[in-house]
Image (cartoon, grey):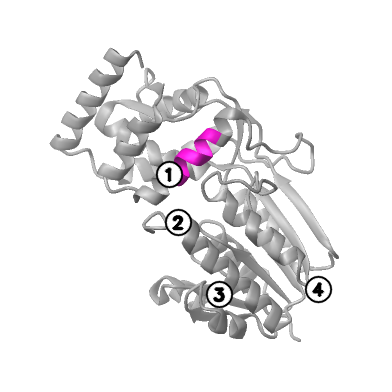
């Protein structure tokens, strides 16, 4: 066995940052993605790039064979007609590949709430994955359980531009933890660089502190020059119609988003108590300034039709008491 580190999802929000840090550290990286063109920057830096799907167990077995450690995940495909079904196939293929390849050390991108065996959107896929890895003899695994991604702030961009409000199906004053993807990559790195862990370990990643969506919206409004930007708790029906009619999410993905929102809103999806070990440095203020703001300004302005739709939504919410 050599010192190769396999990174699945190497062009994603977390995997790309892990691959970058490993290459910077001079490690041998085997990078996996569906897109060959997206992998080219990693190939140019010396990574062994492999193009294939996460539901192809034969392909993944080849990827993991000979690797000292692997970063694995079950991403949410927002375009999938069956999000949980796709997760199930991805999980089963990766578990089969871990067994067949004999890779001894695995770092899994899981999620808060993965201990729950009931469905809260894509959370259930991480539950299946964790349980499956625990059942494989001889595999040492770290389960990273990050909280709500700050990258999800971008889902509000279209609503802000078209309707002049920010909204989700989460109570305005519900405080919950949020994290930036860069901090997840930083937490994963030591386990991959020096995989000396044994058995199974759960590592929560709770972000810098808890925020409410009202507070996040105030921060976004200040950053984009709209200090009066308002957060509105959308009903499940309004959010579902908005994200599906715009084409942002499939009906299955929209159901998943609503499930996660319900889990957060009710407190069913929760992280462990905050500690020095699970607190990460990037604040929402820093994330909005360095990541959200450039992406927000790079997106096209809302079309006339979208603005009219936004006006109709604002009128509806006013009548409905939102």
Within the magenta stretch, is there residue 45?
A: no
Estimate how packed mark 3 is, as few (under 14), some (14 to 19) or many (20 or more) residues with alpha carbons within 10 Å.
Answer: many
Q: SS class of the residue under badge 4?
A: loop
The residue pinned by badge 1 equals: 255
Q: Which residue lies furthest to the front in this view?
A: 118
The residue pinned by badge 3 equals: 31
Q: What stretch is highlighted in magenta?
A: 255-262
Above or below: residue 11 compared with residue 241: below
Mark before the other along the chain sequence, 2 or 1: 2
Query: Can see residue 7?
Result: no
Mark before the other along the chain sequence, 4 or 1: 4
The residue pinned by badge 2 equals: 83
* Cα gap from disc 4 to disc 1, whole angstroms: 35 Å
Q: Quadrant of the C terminus?
A: top left
- Horizontal side of residue 134 vs 89, given as left or right: right
Q: Do the residues labelled 2 and 1 touch (CB within 8 Å)?
A: yes
Q: SS class of the residue under badge 1?
A: helix
Between 176 and 245, the one nearer to me in the picture: 245
Q: SS class of the residue under badge 3?
A: strand
Estimate how packed mark 2 is, as few (under 14), some (14 to 19) or many (20 or more) residues with alpha carbons within 10 Å.
Answer: many
- Horizontal side of residue 128 vs 290, given as left or right: right
Q: Main secondary structure of the magenta part?
A: helix
Q: Which residue lies furthest to the left in this view?
A: 304
| Res 137 label | 4
Count the numbered circles shown. Answer: 4
* Cα gap from disc 3 to disc 1, whole angstroms: 31 Å
Which residue shows up at 75% across the image and 34% down it? 274
Query: Can see residue 21?
Result: yes
| Res 146 label | none
């Amino acid at each position: 066995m050599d010192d190769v580190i396999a990174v699945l999802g190497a062009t994603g929000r977390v995997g790309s940052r892990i691959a970058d840090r490993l290459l910077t550290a001079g490690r041998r990286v085997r990078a996996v993605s569906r897109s060959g063109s997206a992998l080219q920057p990693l190939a140019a830096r010396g990574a062994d790039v492999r193009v294939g799907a996460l539901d192809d167990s034969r392909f993944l077995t080849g990827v993991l064979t000979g690797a000292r450690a692997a970063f694995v995940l079950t991403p949410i495909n927002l375009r999938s007609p069956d999000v949980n079904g796709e997760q199930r196939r991805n999980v089963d293929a990766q578990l089969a590949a871990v067994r067949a390849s004999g890779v001894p050390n695995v770092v899994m991108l899981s999620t808060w709430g993965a201990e729950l065996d009931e469905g809260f959107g894509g959370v259930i896929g991480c539950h299946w994955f964790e349980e499956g890895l625990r059942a494989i003899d001889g595999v040492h695994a770290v389960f990273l359980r990050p909280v709500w991604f700050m990258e999800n702030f971008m889902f509000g961009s279209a609503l802000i531009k078209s309707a002049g409000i920010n909204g989700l199906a989460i109570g305005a004053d519900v405080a919950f933890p949020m994290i930036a993807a860069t901090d997840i990559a930083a937490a994963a790195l030591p386990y991959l660089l020096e995989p000396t862990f044994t058995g199974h370990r759960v590592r929560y990643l709770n972000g810098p502190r808890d925020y409410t969506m009202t507070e996040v919206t105030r921060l976004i409004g200040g950053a984009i020059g709209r200090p009066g930007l308002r957060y509105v708790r959308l009903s499940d029906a309004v959010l579902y119609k908005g994200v599906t009619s715009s084409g942002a999410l499939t009906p299955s993905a929209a159901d998943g988003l609503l499930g996660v929102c319900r889990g957060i809103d009710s407190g069913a999806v929760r992280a462990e108590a905050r500690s020095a070990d699970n607190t990460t440095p990037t604040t929402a203020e820093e994330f909005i300034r360095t990541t959200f703001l450039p992406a927000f300004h790079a997106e096209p302005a809302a079309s006339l039709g979208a603005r009219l739709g936004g006006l109709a939504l604002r009128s509806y919410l006013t009548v409905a008491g939102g």
